[in-house]
Amino acid sequence: MAGARDERGPGPEAGQQLPQPQVACQVFPERLAQGRSQQGFLSSLFTDNRKCQRMLLETLETNPYVKLLLDAMKHSGCAVNKQRHFSCENCDGNVSGGFDASTSQIVLCQNNIRSQAHMNRVATHELIHAFDHCRAHVSWFTNVRHLACSEVRAANLSGDCSLVNEIFRLHFGLKQHHQTCVRDRAILSILAVRNISKEVAQKAVDEVFESCFNDHEPFGRIPHNKTYARYAHRDFQNRDRYYSNI
């Protein structure tokens, strides 16, 4: 989950069992009431919510990263429903979105997502978390290494570290710049949702980086742009048809 950093004190060591925090409530205030969104008809009238819903629909229907992830989720037995599994809400700070494991729901921060390209990246990032939640036993709240692995994968595969985005951030790298970006983005995402020190977050990312950076499922490759993502989606569909005929 992408988000802004806060100044934090020392936290537990990497791998240490963490008490389960009310993360959804801390970052997504509209979930305070009962742990999930209580938005109804009136909230849909607000401009931010309407814009968020419109951009989400565009993303689900046209973005090749998201279309592949939706197919992969369905193939894994976790079909995604727009009304059930996505929620446009107001969020604190600069957080753009998050995956609420307690409800298996993706939160899209309607007050912070301002463009279609941003929506595409956030939806892709959070769907990678949802895919990991579907295919593996991820201890989101109690094992910081599990969170670190999913954040590495999301930064690597969602386009967060594309050349265009890095130029926009005024980050110009040399050799292995993509790996550096992935590492940095994963650490920032962990710090946005966990009350741990930067040192603990860095250690967790370093410990899982090699294996999780090289885990490209369900894309089969690092999709550096939409063209790569379309090729990956085509290959996934062909692979799915192949195995269904065996």
Image (tube, grey):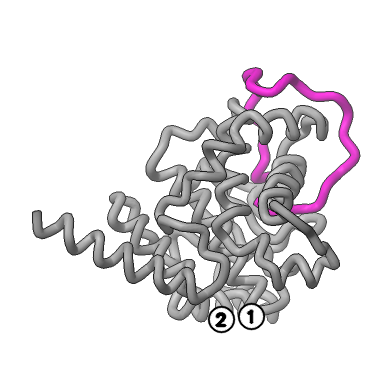
Query: Which residue has dot 1 on it?
Result: 51
Name of the residue lying farthest toward the front = 175
Position in image of residue 206 (x %, y %) = 68, 33
Give the crowd class for mark 1: few <14, some 14-19, many >=20 residues within 10 Å. Answer: some
Image mark for residue 54: 2
* Position above or below: 197 against 218: above
Decide whether residue 15 is among the magenta residues.
yes
Does dot 2 land on a helix, a strand or a loop?
Answer: helix
**Amino acid at circle 2:** Arg
Decide whether residue 237 is among the magenta residues.
no
The magenta stretch is 1-25
Position in image of residue 110 (x %, y %) = 68, 69
Give the crowd class for mark 2: few <14, some 14-19, many >=20 residues within 10 Å. Answer: few
Which of 226/94 is in front?
226
Which of 135/234 is in front?
234
**Residue 162 appears in the figure:** yes
**In the displayed structure image, the side of residue 235 where residue 164 appears, left or right:** right
